[in-house]
Image (cartoon, rainbow, N blue to C red):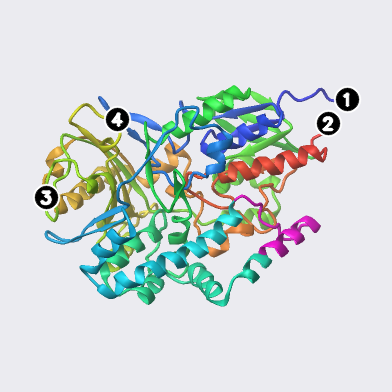
Amino acid sequence: MPSPKPYDALIVGGGHNGLVCACYLAAAGLKVRVLERRTVVGGAAVTEEFFPGFRNSTMSYTVSLLHPKVIRDLRLAEHGLRIIERPIANFLPLSDTQYLKIGGSLEATRAEVARYSKRDAERLPAYYAMLERVAELLRSLLLETPPNVGGGLHDFVSALKTGNRLRKLDMTARRDVLDLFAKSAADLLDSWFESEPLKAAFGFDAIVGNFASPYTPGSAYVLLHHVFGEVNGKRGAWGHAVGGMGAITQAMAREARSLGVEINTDCEVAKVCVDGRGTQGVQLADGRMIDARCVVSNLNPKLLYLKLVGESALDPDFAQRIRNWKCGSATFRMNVALSELPDFSCLPGKSLDDHHKSGIIIAPSLRYMEQAYFDARTIGCARAPVVEMLIPSTVDETLAPPGKHVASLFCQHFNPELPNDLDWDEIKEPAADLVIDTVTRYAPNFKDAVLGRKTFSPLDLERDFGLTGGDIFHGALTLDQLWSARPMLGHGDYRGPIKGLYMCGAGTHPGGGVTGIPGHNAAREIIRDVKKGKFKE
C-alpha cells in the first residue's frame, strides 16, 4: 500500500485565484500548499516600491470585478481590505479645450454628454439599462461551472438550466445578448450614439487587454466583461484598493494562513509529475519533489500544458489546440513617480479635483484606437498609444511622500511579437518615452513632473509574471475561448485532461480580471471530487 501523500492539493501560482482556491479548499478540510515563483504572493495583483519612497500596484491597478461572495467568504474586509469608489468613472481629455466626464451620477453624465449630443444624452439611460440586463445574465453564470461538452447527466442538466435563462428573456433582450457577444464594439456603439467622445469613452473598455480594434467582431463582449462588477455594492462602479492591489492578495494570504494553508515564495515549479495513474505532484526548479493527491494550476493554460506538463503526456489533438490558444493583449504597463499632479490643458489646475481621481483615458475616438491597433500590427507599437492613467495617491496617502503622487499607466497597443527583428529589451525605454510624450500632449507639465518610472513591456509581463504573450487575461476573451470552451471544449469544468490535474486561473471561466471567481469555482469542483472519493489512494 502506498503511503498517504503529504498534501491533498498543491496550488501552482500564488496569484489571487490561486489564493482564493486555496482558502476554499482549506476551509473544506483539505491540506493545501501554495507554490509561488516570485518573492511575494499575489501574482499580477501586488503592491511594490518602484522608486524610493513611492509604492504602487505593480500590474493590475484598479478594482471592480472582485466578486462580493469572495470578499465575504474570505473575510477580506476583516483582514484590512478597504476599497474607495472613484468619484467619477472616467475623464477623457479630447483636445486643448474639450473634455468629457463619465460618472458621478446619471444626470451629471447626461449633462456632460449633452454638450456633444442632446440625442445621445436622451439615449443614455436606455443604453445603461440594456447593458445591465445582459450583465445580469452574465452575473447569473459567473459562479456556475459551465456545462462540460461531452459530460454526463449533470452537465446536460446544467446546459438546460442555462438555456432556460435565455428562454425567459424577452426578444429584445435576446437580441441584445447576440449583439454583445457577436458584434464589434464600434458597430454596437454606432447603433446607439452619434458623438465620437461618448463612443470613445465606452469603447475603451472593449480594447482593455484585448489586442484588437474596436471594429473587430466580438470586441463588444470585452466591453461587457468590464461592466459586470461592483464596488461596495454599487454595480458598474470602479475603485481603488487602499494600499494598492496587493492589499487584496495580502488579505487573501492572511485568510489562507489562518485556515492552515502553507504558502511558499521563491518556489518555482519546473514540472507537473504525471504517470499512468494520473497527476502525482510537482518537481521544483531546485529538483525537490512534492507529492499531492491533486495539482491545481493558476497559470496560463499554454504555460501549464506546454511547459510544465509536456506534450508527451497529452492527447495529440489537445496538445495541438492548446498550442493554438490565443494569447497576447498588446499591453505596456508603467508606474511613474510624480512631483505634482498633471495639469490638463482642457481642464487646467494642479490642485486635486475629481478628474484626478478618475480613470483618465487618452483615446479621443474609436478611430484613434483603431489606428493604434493598426500601428502595432504593422510596426510593433502604436504611434499614438491608448493610455489609461490612474493616480491612486489622490485617495491613498500611503503610496507616495506628502505632496507627491504615483500614477499607473495602462497602455495599448504594443505588439508582443515585434516585426523586423526588433527586440523589446532594446525598444522598451523609447516606447516608455512615447507614452510619456502622449500624456504630455494633453497635460503639458507631465513630463517634467516625472521623478522616476518603472516600465513593463509585453515581454516583461511574460518573463516576470508568467503572462504568456503579455496577456493579462491568460487568453483572449473571444467567442471560441469563453464559457465551456475556456480553455477548451471538454475541459471547461476546471478539470484538466489528466486525473488529478485542475485549473483555477483566468484561462478558465469566466476569464480575466481580479475576480476570484475561477478560484472559487475550481475549488467547488475539487471538493465535489473529494466527496466522490476520486482521490482515494
Where's residue 391, x and y in %? Answer: 27, 41
Query: Which label belongs to residue 537?
Result: 2
CA gap, disc 3 and disc 4 = 25 Å
Residue bearing the label numbered 3:
348
Query: Which label belongs to residue 292?
Result: none
Q: Are marks 1 and 2 in contact (CB under 8 Å)?
A: yes
Q: Quadrant of residue 295?
A: top right
Q: Which residues are magenta?
A: 143-162
Q: Amino acid at mark 3?
A: Pro
Q: Tell me which numbered mark, 3 or 2, is placed earlier along the sequence.
A: 3
Where's residue 54, x and y in %? Answer: 27, 29
Q: Is residue 425 left or right of residue 71?
A: left
- Foreground mark, 1 or 2, reads 2
The residue nearer to you, when weighing 298 against 309, is: 298
Q: Tell me which numbered mark, 3 or 1, is placed earlier along the sequence.
A: 1
**How packed is label 2: few (under 14 Cα within 10 Å), some, or many (20 or more)?**
few
Where's residue 263, x and y in %? Answer: 57, 24
Query: Which label belongs to residue 399?
Result: 4
Query: Which label belongs to residue 1?
Result: 1
- Mark yes or no: residue 500 visible: no
- Helix, strand or loop at mark 4: loop
- Helix, strand or loop at mark 3: loop
Q: Amino acid at mark 1?
A: Met
**Which quadrant is the N terminus positioned in?**
top right
CA gap, disc 1 and disc 2 = 8 Å
- Foreground mark, 3 or 4, reads 3
- Helix, strand or loop at mark 2: loop
Tell which residue pokes out farthest to the front in this image.
Answer: 107
- Foreground mark, 1 or 4, reads 4
Q: Tell me which numbered mark, 1 or 2, is placed earlier along the sequence.
A: 1
The residue nearer to you, when weighing 146 against 470, is: 146
